[in-house]
Image: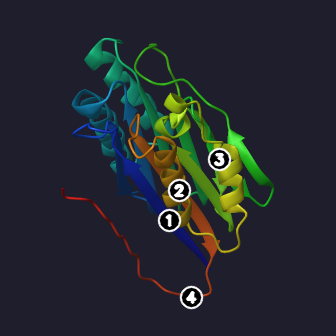
Amino acid sequence: MMELQVAAAKVAKYAARESGDTLEMIERPQGGLSFVLADGQRSGRSAKAISNLVAREAIALLAEGVRDGAAARAAHDHLFTHYQGKVSATLHIVSVDLSSGTVVVSRNSPSPVWVRGPGGLQALEPSQPIGIYKRTKPLIHELSIAAPLHLVLYTDGLESAGQRYGERLDVSRVVGDLLSRPQVSAPDVAEELLRLAVALDRGHPGDDISVLVLSIVPSAEQEEVRRLLVRFPLG
């Protein structure tokens, strides 16, 4: 038996009313789950409008059974047309596709996706954001569903944390250390990465930061119950 664990931790730029990052989840028509993480150019409400537009377009198509790569290209086309090529966004789509038995990673982001499987830790190379150049396409990787398998992705606020103070987060080292721990969980990784980034910014994040972690781990329990827990501050 295997179990999928998914955890996200996100925080808005200090003093911003809203985060410019949008995270959405949907159940796939043929079985499985898809997660969409979009980061709009700028910050605050204008960035949120951009990331919402991108995420909504991708999620709507995924819900209809459209393939991930096609959904990502359509989200780019929608953004490019709506803003006439004047704004950009980063986009990650990660799907656990039960019909194909694979984890599909589609991305348009200069930040890498970190993957740890039986072969060790590797980075899926960066790619071009959407919205600016007409024929932008996502980079796509497919990984077999197997345990253990961990994926860590994030918006650029994680990598820029601490820059105002001449510091930076060594993401590859931290991710490698966290994922090498026995029985590590997705929530542990997401929370620790966000905690370290906010600490480097002295408690005042210089940009929106979102971290999404997917882990497929062995499970001794033959349980059919699915669970979702959300914690959202209300002010």
Residue at 39% across, 29% down: 74
Give the secondary structure at mark 1: helix
Position of 172 relative to 157 (above/below): below
Residue at 58% across, 30% down: 166
**Which comes sooner in the sequence, label 4 or label 1?**
1
The residue where tag 1 is placed is 187
Q: Is residue 234 left or right of residue 149?
A: left
Three-letter amino acid code of the residue under disc 2? Val
Residue at 62% across, 31% down: 126
Total numbered labels: 4
The residue where tag 3 is placed is 114
For the residues bearing labels 1 and 2, Cβ distance under 8 angstroms: yes
Residue at 49% across, 48% down: 199
Q: CA distance from mark 4 to mark 2?
A: 22 Å
The residue where tag 2 is placed is 213
Badge 4 density bin: few <14, some 14–19, many ≥20, Cα 10 Å: few
Badge 1 density bin: few <14, some 14–19, many ≥20, Cα 10 Å: some
Q: CA distance from mark 3 to mark 2?
A: 10 Å
Residue 95 percent across, percent down from the top left: 50, 52
Q: CA distance from mark 4 to mark 1?
A: 19 Å
Residue 103 percent across, percent down from the top left: 59, 54
Q: CA distance from mark 1 to mark 3?
A: 16 Å
Give the secondary structure at mark 4: loop
